[in-house]
Amino acid sequence: MTTRFKIIVAGAGPGGCVFARDLAAAGHEVVVYEKGDYETLGHNWSDAVERIALKEIGLDVPEEGPVNKGPLVKKVGRSGKGPAIFEEHAFPEMDVWAPDYSSKKKIHFRYITTDRRALGKLLADQATEAGARVEYGYEVVKPILEGGKTLDEVRVTGAIVKELASGEETTVQADVTADDTGFAAALRTQLPGETGISEKFKESEFAMVHRTVRQRDKTKAIEDIVRDHYRYGFYTGYQWAQELNEDEIDVGAGIKYKAKVPDPQETVERFIAKHDSITDKVVRGGGGLCLVGKSPYSLVANGLVVLGDAASQTIPMTGCGAGGAMMGGKLAAESVDQAAEIGQADISALWSYNRKWFVDSGRGANYAALTALRNILQKLSNFDNSFLFRKDVFSGDMLTSSINGIFQVPTLSLMMKTGLSCISRPDLLLTLNKATSIGTKLYKHYLRYPKSWNPRTFESWSRKSEQLFLKAQ
Ligand SMILES: Cc1cc2nc3c(=O)[nH]c(=O)nc-3n(C[C@H](O)[C@H](O)[C@H](O)COP(=O)(O)OP(=O)(O)OC[C@H]3O[C@@H](n4cnc5c(N)ncnc54)[C@H](O)[C@@H]3O)c2cc1C
């Protein structure tokens, strides 16, 4: 007989809301505590969000077309009238340029530009409509821990929740507590170090991103054509321009956090200065740190599941994490509901979430391999990256896969082609071989993720993962 679980969720990000929505719909008692408020959920701009994830969580996503000029206006409120959350922009094909603009590749861009404020509200509304309670202005301060210190022993039995207006703290007991607090991972990082999954993300696991949405001067735009594009491998990161609609253009850049290269804001301003049609009028925008790190080796503990950025469910090549967070929320909810069928919320009962994320959905295995690839390739200069574009080692296929979060296991013919293309650059060939070989090993290793919870098997699997990641430094 299915037990009705009491579930609390820290954070109303995309992962937390989908998780809460699905479990409330399955009949569980769910409360989401969000330290911010309804109006400021998400962020103040539009993101490229994976179409597949939006569809998987049940949203009606417009079909791909050369450009969507349908009735896709950004508006959705508490009334929740339909998911009209997408920008008009929706090019399925995009030009990806070499850092020095010497060559470009066409890629299939499987994202849709989505207003993150509107998406945030829509998902929170859906959670509420399904029967979850969403409490704004409440911060989850720490998990309540019982048992010993190892992953096998420690149990999360709820959390201390603070009402921000009054400062009053309350102890809330729960069968399952979910950490969806973003990359600070406020609950996971307060587990004992002995669990092996409590580490904070390191500085090297972040990108620094700046984006600005500017008003365009339509008369000048006739002459000053700015095609949607992405510049890949530019100063350890990327730079992009996307026409959101007739009036607005989104220009941005990202670099490895603290890399000794020009600041992304400077790159963006330099780009804008070259284009007459892009005015000084800032419509919205912002930026900051964007997680591109690796997941902890387990996303569950006794009584705990970790979602979204707190679990690093972001695509390592781009930092796109809204899709991963929603998928994490969906998969975790399935596992928690299955655990309720046997009336247990211990690590064994919740383990299937790990398997779903790392193996069955393929996401975890792909992201691990791409993390290794990125760590190694990030050391290449603009000159090296441009060379690899010209030689078609960075081909349309390869870029389509990695930008969409998929690791391409190299075939023999691909390796031969790479070898021939880099004959004049043995140093680059060595770097590429290292990246693809460690990436492939990690990918295969993740597909052998432990099928069920066993402390010894898990420890040996984690040790091997650590060794592989160390080689990718
Ligand atoms: C500049 C920038 C650009 C990005 N661009 C893209 C993009 O183009 N595409 C894309 O897919 N992703 C993008 N991302 C990443 C994306 O925003 C995240 O991966 C995604 O939002 C993670 O979702 P989440 O479920 O982890 O929750 P988050 O969105 O991280 O939200 C966490 C929520 O928890 C709340 N919270 C935090 N701590 C507590 C606490 N202790 N108690 C209660 N509430 C708490 C916060 O207020 C917040 O509402 C970008 C990120 C940045 C910074």
Image (cartoon, grey):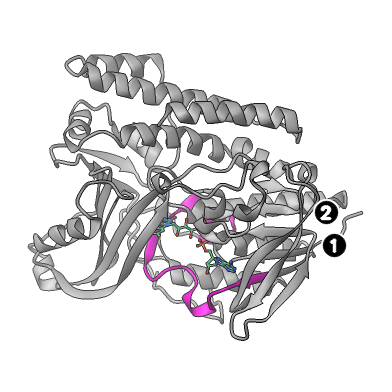
**Can you identify the residue that label 1 sits on?**
4
The span from disc 2 to disc 1 (Cα, nearest Å) is 7 Å
Question: Does 309 sit above or below residue 472?
Answer: below
Q: Which mark is residue 340?
A: 2
* Residue closer to the observer: 56 or 408: 408
The local crowd at label 2, few if under 14, some if 14 to 19, many if 20 or more residues have their Cα within 10 Å, is many
Give the extent of the magenta segment.
Answer: 32-60
Q: Secondary structure at mark 1?
A: loop
Outermost bottom residue: 166
> Looking at the image, can residue 99 be seen?
yes
**In x, y percent, where is residue 55?**
54, 55
Q: Earlier in the sequence, mark 2 or mark 1?
A: 1
Question: Does 152 sit above or below residue 281?
Answer: above
Question: Which quarter of the picture shows residue 365?
Answer: top right
Question: Does 379 sit above or below residue 416?
Answer: below
**In x, y percent, where is residue 375?**
38, 35
**In x, y percent, where is residue 280?**
16, 73
Q: What's the residue type where badge 2 is placed? A: Ala
Tell me the residue at 80%/48% (across/down). Answer: 346
Left or right, residue 313 beside residue 433? right
Tell me the residue at 32%/61% (across/down). Answer: 89
Question: Which quarter of the picture shows residue 137?
Answer: bottom right
Q: What's the residue type where badge 1 is placed? A: Arg
Question: Which quarter of the picture shows residue 14?
Answer: bottom right
Q: Are marks 2 and 1 in contact (CB under 8 Å)?
A: yes
* Residue closer to the observer: 91 or 338: 338
Is residue 224 located in the magenta-colored stretch of the structure? no
**In x, y percent, where is residue 58?**
59, 59
